[in-house]
Image (cartoon, rainbow, N blue to C red):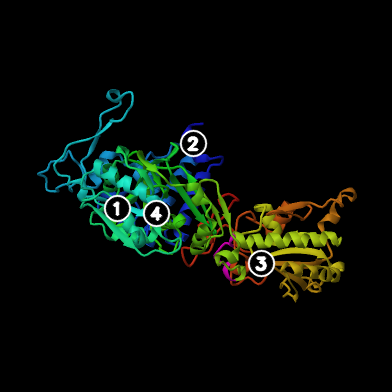
Amino acid sequence: MPRWRALVRLGSPLAASAVLGALATLLLTSPSGDDLLPERSALFSESSLHRHVLCGDSVELRRTMAARLQRIRTELATAAELNRQPDPSVLSQLTELAQRLDARAALAQLDPDELDKTFGLDHDSDSDSESEPARSEVCPELYHGAADDAPLHNNGFVTEECKEAPPLHTVISVLMPVTDSTAASDAARVVTQLLRLYPRLPVIVAAAAAETGALRALLPRGEPSVKLVPAELSGSARLGTLLNKASAAASTPYVLVARQLSHATGELLLERHVRVLGRLAMVDAVGGAARNRSGHWRAGCLQTTMSGHRLSYSAGYRHSALECMLCDHLDESFATRTATMRDLPLDTTLPDAVVVHDWFLRLRRGARLAALCPDIMYESARRPVAEERAVDAWRQLATKWQLSSLSLAGGTQHKFRCRDVAIQCNPLRTARFYSQPPCCQDQLERALRLVSAALAESGVKHELEAGALLAAVKLGEPLPWGINTQIAINADDFELVSSRMSRLRRYGLVLEPVTEPVPANATNSEARLATVLRVHTPAMLITLRPEHHFSTDQLPAEMRRRPTLVRLGGVWLPGHANPGRYARNRYGYDCLKHAVHWRYANDELVGEYSRYVAGVWPACPNHHHACLDQLPADGSLGLP
């Protein structure tokens, strides 16, 4: 089979077209927001780059793209049915759509010459043309090849001489925050070395007002380009205030945020920072790799994923441009536009260990990009491992962003209780549109473990049922959008269970006998079993429902003493004898696809046995990271 036909078929004739149809539906139903569309078209250069990147917040534009996907879908389906090769333009159309949806993919596809033309830096163009090229802020560089640069390869790229570039000291300043007195000697050394490398370079040193006298004595004397900015500081939130003060004092279009440099060497490459920022209008921060005091080198390009009250960092990159990695977070020093620092000031309430993380999260939320050029190298005195272990600092960041779980790039994990990060568990109020935080799920798992142990110790037959068993089949853990975990218990033991469960109050659980409404299509026997026992965590809910019939009784006699156990998070619970069969027969077509709780699926539904559509989420009213419509509506992978 030809490769194109295997690609189109993907195992069935219309599989590829079905995938494209789903993408078209996603574009039509997804809320406009920062996870799909950039929020600010002003971030993009007024140039032909608009051909490559989806800008603005336009429903009509998304509908247009969805229509294009549908047309491509039809072409692929027709080609598969007629056993012919699709039109070659299909691939280019898909490539263009991918680039418009992800600015990083667009930048990765542009070659350097096209970037120069895009941003008015075409140095081969005629200067007498009607469209005069924009003035470059640094001279261009040219790659001369590797042969003449062996064996050390220090000068393959060479900066060309030019007349149009202004002096570097009018283009970029260095912001140097001194957060404590122990960093003063490093700061003084770095300032001296910077001025040797770049005479007249503006260096703005920001420090606590009480420490400026001692620091002034260490700094080079008689250097008009060195400015010492005092700030009133208190507590552990110092870095944000210092950088905001320093950026306010800058008069150049770009600034280098120097984060605990130990030395300044020729590997700093300030021109490279400016050149990348000047050529990539969508990039608002450019950094480099770092070598620490022990000589260990690392790139520090991180990607972030924020979903369902979880934040995770991972090292690496998916796209690159101008030999720079495109990143969500830069872990060391970085250069940015001075206007960006002023438009997006650092949060002065957050501790030093997390304030830059917060800045990059806000940068990403605004659909702005960061780039790390590994040929730039900083000599760094930072201790990222110690920063990752600053639990209270990360708790404050988690509180601000409504997170309960963080996975950091160095392997450190932070999990917070809901009350520690001001999160309230209320699935009845939030499950229509939002997934439940991990800390709420932890409450539920703890309660399930206690309830199951109490039932087992009392010898009470019980089975997980309804949506809770469906969750075990699909995910192996509670549904993040679930409301209630339902367990059937032997009706003859209901009074025994009520009395035995009272001991669980010592663990903070609340027990409540309730007469629940009977489903409209319930039989008379079900109607007599309407009194249930609710167990509250207190925020999450477990319902113990009396039942006379158990699937274990259908097993052969020699197997009935070993009920089928299913995993729900960290707890193994008795379930239906054949959990998968129960799920399919109970929920019918598309039972493995996801849907909100039946209470929210359709206003016309009258009970839990009503049929409702799975595989689609309701549109979220905002762009919160816990919105269900940001999750796949099918499959167990990619869920928080």
Is tag 1's residue or tag 2's residue first in the polypeptide sequence? Answer: 2
Q: Which label was assigned to residue 181?
A: 4
Amino acid under label 3? Met
| Left or right position of 543 against 425 | right
Q: Nearer the viewer, residue 210 or 14?
A: 210
Q: Which tag is nearer the camera, tag 4 or tag 3?
A: 4
Q: Secondary structure at mark 3?
A: loop
Q: Do the CB atoms of the residues marked 1 and 2 lie less than 8 Å apart? A: no
Position in image of residue 193 (x %, y %): 29, 42
Give the residue type that dot 1 points to.
Answer: Ala
Q: Secondary structure at mark 4?
A: helix
- Using the numbered discs, state the Cα–Cα distance from disc 1 to disc 2 in whole angstroms: 74 Å
Residue 5, numbered label:
2
Q: Nearer the viewer, mark 1 or mark 2?
A: 1
In primary-sequence order, the first of circles 2 and 4 is: 2
Which label is found at residue 540? Answer: 3
Q: First in sequence: mark 4 or mark 3?
A: 4
Is residue 312 shown left or right of residue 75? right
Q: Main secondary structure of the magenta part?
A: loop
Magenta stretch: includes residue 434: yes
Q: Residue at x 67, y 56 (%)?
A: 471
The three-letter code of the residue at mark 4 reads Ser
